[in-house]
Every structure is written in C-alpha cells, then in structure tokens.
Image: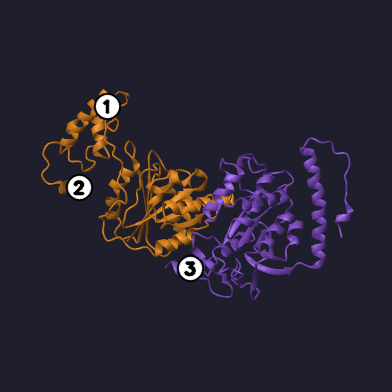
Amino acid sequence: MKFIIFAGTPGSGKTSTIKYIIKELKDEFKLFFAKFDCLETSDSEKIEKEFNIPSVKKLAGDICPDHYTALEIPKILRQNQDKDIVILETAGLCLRCSPYVEEGLGINILDITSGDPFRYGPILTQADIVAVSKGDLISQAEREIFRAKILKINPSAKIVDVNGLTGEGAIDIASFIKSSSNIGGTSLTLKHSMPSAICGYCYGNKIIDNDKVQERYLKGKELKNLIPNLNCGKCGFKTCNEFIRGVLDKKAKKEDCPFIKNVKNKDDLCQ
Amino acid sequence: MIGIRGSVMNEKIKKITILPGKDKSGKKEEFEHIDIETGQSIAIVGNTGAGKSQLLYDIERLAQNDTKSNRKFLVNDKKPNKETRFNPKRKLIASLSQSMHFLTDISVEDFLKLHLESRGKKQDKKIIEEVIKIANEITGEAISHDMNLLSLSGGQSRALMVADVAIISDSPIILIDELENAGIKKEKAVEVLIKKNKMILIVTHDPSLALSTDKRLIIKNGGITKILNTTKQEKEIAHHLNWIESHNLNIRDQIRSGKEVKHLEIDCTQIK
C-alpha cells in the first residue's frame, strides 16, 4: 500500500489539485481518501460522489489537527489494508508542523501568492514534492525567485507547477505517486516532532493569568495520570485530552472513562 | 553526478520538433513534423476551447506520448532525457501573460538583483541598467530603478517583465499569452526577445501580433490543422497595423499626462 499525505494552507488549491490526481489514478488503483479538517468540510463527500471512491471525514475539533491526524493514521491504514493507495489531505493550518511520515510520500501544495517560502517550516522543508499553485498570477521573475528559495530550504524537493483549475501538473504528481515505495505496515514515523503543547490553555483555560494557567495545568496533569491516554473514545470524546478538558469544564465526569483507575493491559483498550 | 547534471544543463536547446498526436475525436494530426528554432516566433491561433492550452502544456513538459493529445517532442533532433524535462532548476518555458502581476514590495533595482541572485548570476549593475533601458524602449511611461515594483502601471509592469525575461531568465522558450491592450509596443517586445535568441510562442487573436510572427499554427478540435508561413504581404500588413497602433499609444500617453489632444500627427515617413 502507498500512503500519500497532502498538506498546504487553506485556499492553496489542495482539494482541486487532488481531484485531478485522483482522476489520473482511479482506473488503475484501488483508492481511499481521508480528509482532515478542524470544524467542517464537505470535500470528502464531494470526492466520494464524483469519483465513486470510499472516503472518510475527520474533524479535529478542540485539538491540534496535526496531532489528531497522527492519532488517526493507524486506524485509517488498518481499515484499508485492501487498498493500493491511501490519500490523506490534512487541515493544513500550521507552518511549524510536518504531518508527513518517513515511510510515505509527503506533498506540500504551496500557494505562490502566499509570500516568502522562508516563512514555512516542516510543512515545506520536509516535503518530498512541492506543488506550486497559482503560478499563472505572478511574474516569471518572481516564480523563478520562489523556486530558488524553495530549493534553498528543501534542496531535495521535486518541484511541480500545478493549477487547480486546469489540472496542470496532475499527471506529473500521479507518476511520482506511482513510482513511490509501499509502506511496510501500519507502524510509521513522523518526519518531524509535534510542538510541545501541554499547558493550562491546552486544558481549556481561558483566563489570561499565569497562576490560573498553572492551577488548571496541575489539575489536568492529575487526571492525565489516572487515564490510559489511548484515545479509545469510549467516554464520548475523541481524545483523552478533550476528555480532560470536558471534566475540568464540568461537561463530563471522571467516571465517564471506563478505565480511569486500573489499567492492566493497554492493548486491550485499543479494540 | 555533478558532471552529468552539468553536461545536461550546458546543452543549449536550439530546436524543438513536434511530432503529430491526435485531435479530440482521435484522428491523427496531418503533419509530419513541426520545427521551432531559436530566434523564431510562432503564433498559436484558434477558437476558445480549440486546444491551445493543451499544446502549450505539451510543449512545457516536452510530452512523450503521455498527454491527452499523444504528441511527442524532440529536442535538437533527439529524445529529451528526464533531466531536461523535469529539472527543477531550469524551466524550459518562461511565460508572460495578461493575468500576471508583481506581488513583491521592493524597488525595481533590488528586485532585479534578487532575480539575478536566484539564477546564480552576478549582481552586475550593467545588466540591471540594460533591463531597465530595454523596458523603457517597450513602454512609453518611463521606469526608473528606484520605483517600487507595486506602483508600476500595467504597461510598465508588462514591459519590465518582457525585458527581465529576455535578459535574466535562462528559459529558451518564451510563451506569451494574450498581450493585447497592455499599453506597450508589442512589436518591439517581440523583437527584443528574438534578438536574445529565444523561441517565442504567442497565443493571440491580435492581428498585428499574429502577423508579426514567422509561422502560425491553427488549432481546431484539439489538433493542429494547418501551418501557415507568414507571407511577405502579411508581414507588411502587420507593420502597418503596428504603425497605426503606435499612434494610438501616443494619443493614449497624451491623454494620460493631462494634455489636450488637438490633432492626430501621422508620421508617414515611418511607413514603407
């Protein structure tokens, strides 16, 4: 199975470019499409309807969409062992993160009108392929400068010009996908670590006050030590962190987690 | 590795050959081959949706029977290797189109320096002066080195883009998509590019521009249906049309600079 991750800022033309790429691949391969977003999206349904390929919509809600993506990848891959290619489109908000994995192919759709490439972190620097969109809107000179800058921060990148309106570049990306290697199993490694993001604000604190943040953090930590941190979803929340926020905000009770005290075999909880 | 890459980069593209593919109904295109050489200009004409963009796309990626049209290309009479086709450091086609704008907030001079740097060239003052000089020959509104890129008018921007592509860009092929009404001397723009030994492809419906080129490819239903060499008479007509347009441009500049236009001064000495 091949595992392809598309990342790029909102409005960069990810979905429209992916559509043209799916068109190139769908007759030859069994595909699956997963769309991650924060609050809402209709992209997965549109793609499922248009190309008749199975899809899933994943909404991150209160947690960082890239963290959520990493948490969900094993499930998606496990459920799609019969597919040839799994295409995942990230929410694409953070320039600091890289949602790419070592074993798969990471493609950054980069809007040329969005400013200096040097502003981008791992989303660009760790991509295997950089697909530059909207190049038809700016001067040749600026396009050449943009390319040179991309190669400066990601020297091994393959650069492809794409156009979400005409489908330009889709054949090239499809051929890179075809020649990419298969992933061995469902155990994958992130190309870049996620940001350190555990503080009282992450546990839902809203008052800007260092003492209050600390207080909330300690309460959250206490709860965190009591739960399995396996994101099984049995409490009704997508992740354990969301559950902790829920308890601290009094939207849920500790007891809603069926494993809150004694966890013997963590593997059993995954089922 | 460096040696191999170097040798490919150094091979100058002198000629591109189009071998026939098929049109939208699957019929083979009726020509044996079309050669485009450096210093030549070609117009691509046809109705909207006829397949002009497909042809440009095929040329840009030097298609090898791997696009919808099934066309194939040769470079200097040989099949191009992958390095020539997909080298990220050297794009084959540089393009200029009506929809393009400058987006960088920087002075003209610093911008040209940045472009030179990105092409791995020395930031030579002489080159920058040459670009600005040529741009000023193409537009009537003077461009100076300290102007901000974002404050340039449409005509000034277009003129600077042409001069920059002619001198700083390495791409051997220049694609011009609809240059009409840009407020620049189009004939001069094409002349500048030809002098720099570029291959020029112009998608246009503009008569003076289409007739200034060496050849016209007529596209219908996705296929190249006709290849016309521009006749001597057509070149003369183009010259006359350009002459009329230069007067148009002159009056336009008078209106722009707040002058009262009193009469049309037609300088007949310029026309053969």
Q: What residue did someone put label 3 on?
A: B82
Q: Is residue A7 left or right of residue B24?
A: left
In the rendering, at what x and y percent does residue A1 appear?
32, 61
In the rendering, at what x and y percent does residue A181 appear?
34, 63
Q: Chain of mark 1?
A: A
Mark 3 residue element: helix
Labels 1 and 2 in the same subunit: yes
Nearer the observer, disc 1 or disc 2?
Answer: 1
Q: Is residue A104 left or right of residue B198?
A: left
Question: Dot 1 surroundings within 10 Å: few (below 14), some, or many (20 or more)?
Answer: some
Of the numbered discs 1 and 2, the one sitting upstream in the chain is 1
Mark 1 residue element: helix
Q: Chain of mark 3?
A: B
Q: Is residue B210 left or right of residue B173?
A: right
Q: Which mark is residue A270?
A: 2
In the rendering, at what x and y percent does residue A34 appear?
36, 50
Q: Which one of the lettered chains is coloured orange? A: A
Would you place residue A260 above or below residue A147 in this image? above
Q: What residue did someone put label 1 on?
A: A213
Would you place residue B79 above or below residue B129 in this image? below
Q: Colour of chain B?
A: purple
Looking at the rendered structure, the kind of residue marked 1 is Val
